[in-house]
Amino acid sequence: MRTLLNLTRIEHPFLIWRRLAPATRGRIIVGMVVLAAAVLSIATGYIIIGNRMRLALLIFGPLLAIPAILWISRRFEYAVLALPVTALAIPFELPTGTHSKIPAATILALTLCGIWIVSMGLRGTWHLAPSPLNRPMLVFCIACTISLVWGVVWRDPILNMSLFKNFEVVQVASLLTYFISIGAALLIGNFVRSEQRLKYIVGCFLFFGSIMTLCQVFSIRHGFLNDRGLWGLWTVVPAYALVIAHPGLKWHWRLLLLTLIGLNLYQTILVNLLWKSGWVPTVIGIFAATLLRSWRWFLVLLVAVSMLVYTQQEFFHRMVEAEINEGADGRIGMWEINLRVVGDHWLFGTGPAGYAPYYMTYYPYDARSTHNNYLDILAQFGLVGSLIWLWFAAVSTTEGLRLFREAPPGFLKTLALTATSGWIGAQASMFFGDWILPFAYNQTITGYRYTVYSWIFVGVLISLRQLINRQHAGETVGEVV
């Protein structure tokens, strides 16, 4: 019996490999490489001829992802610093086989969040940098997840779901987009730990924002800059904050920044007047920054703008007429439709992107999105999700005001002014149809590339809290010594 067992025992492959002669092992390795190259070549030809993008992702995705993940995990803090550049100026998009494409900023943020979560799980240390923003953001993620399940369970059986292919996949993708929006803020807040790196982030927005402004003013075509969404807000407000609040800034830099502000406002207000979400949030951000800096200068600015509006009444009258001709008064009808849908799903909403089937079933001839991000949140995540969002908006704004008061004069105080006033303008933009949380059937997943701008500066608020607390702790130790 023992002999029979010895005959049938399978020897470990590694032991067999070690017994082979070096020349034999070399020939086997070369053969495997040639065979792999042949298989990949055949697969590549099959994919190209048939335009099978999903198969391409299945085959080549892991081959590219594994070395990229290993490289990123070793240089994680530097990879986090690539977020603003990737969003502002990397046009690469990964095809999905549908109309929606995954931009480089989404891929990077998702990869970084995944590595971070896995590393915390392996170490058993679940830790976030202390910030009052953490709790409302995480609770909002939980509410969004509940809304996804709730929307599926309580979905109207009469809905015409045949109009939406892979609708559940779209919903999950939308949910992931919301998660990594918050994830981008947490990444910046937890891994950008020095004043120099915060200067780098501001410099990215000023540098690329300046190029975007010049390209638009002089009608220069480009294929790599992402001048969509709130790019104007996050170009002008940092420049304006540096001009009015940064001590010791040389006059030629102030002049250059004022020129940038003037060109941007000329392009967004005079040239692109009807795109209100392109300039109204910026104006609100300027007013907010001025009020935080000095209430006297705020009154001066308010009087100056009031006189401008009074002396240019004909211009603003034409603007209102153009808005009405463009169908601005139709938004009330869109909001009424939205509230009808919400009335039957008011607790946790219809789930991520969930109100689209209701529109197409019950209002097929007027199935337009709300062009109001607050109503989008209400329709998708219900009253519970909306209240949590308002909680987060209040906490983040209050934290920004607190940081501005606590920060010593210098760059950190200027950056606190930038992030707080810009975030106020971003929240105002939600009324005008610009998305802080991208909607799947308007921007698609690609919209993450520019909605993440605001989340980067939310992360700056978290980072500022750590730096300011560290400075105060150092001052306390110095006093004790």
Image (cartoon, helix red, strand yellow):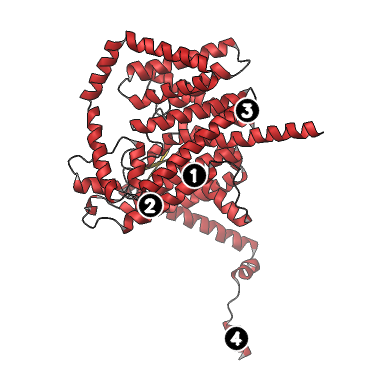
The image position of residue 248, as x and y in percent, is 63, 15
Q: Which mark is residue 5?
A: 4
Q: What amino acid type is highlighted by mark number 1?
A: Met
Q: Which mark is residue 407?
A: 3
Image-quadrant location for residue 340: top left
| Distance of label 4 from label 2 (alpha carbons) | 58 Å
At 33% from the left and 20% from the top, the residue drawn is: 272
Please, what secondary structure does the residue beneath circle 1 have?
A: helix
| Distance of label 1 from label 4 (alpha carbons) | 61 Å
Mark with earlier residue (2, 3): 2
Q: Is residue 22 left or right of residue 239?
A: right
Q: What amino acid type is highlighted by mark number 4?
A: Leu
| Distance of label 2 from label 1 (alpha carbons) | 15 Å
Q: Which mark is residue 137?
A: 1
Mark with earlier residue (2, 1): 1
* Residue hosting label 2: 147
Q: Is residue 308 above or below residue 268?
A: above
| Distance of label 1 from label 3 (alpha carbons) | 24 Å
At 47% from the left and 14% from the top, the residue drawn is: 299
The image position of residue 120, as x and y in percent, is 59, 52
Residue 231 shows up from this direction: yes
Say which of 424 and 384 sits in front: 384
State the quadrant of the N terminus: bottom right
Q: What amino acid type is highlighted by mark number 2?
A: Ser
Mark with earlier residue (4, 2): 4
Mark with earlier residue (4, 3): 4
| Distance of label 2 from label 3 (alpha carbons) | 39 Å
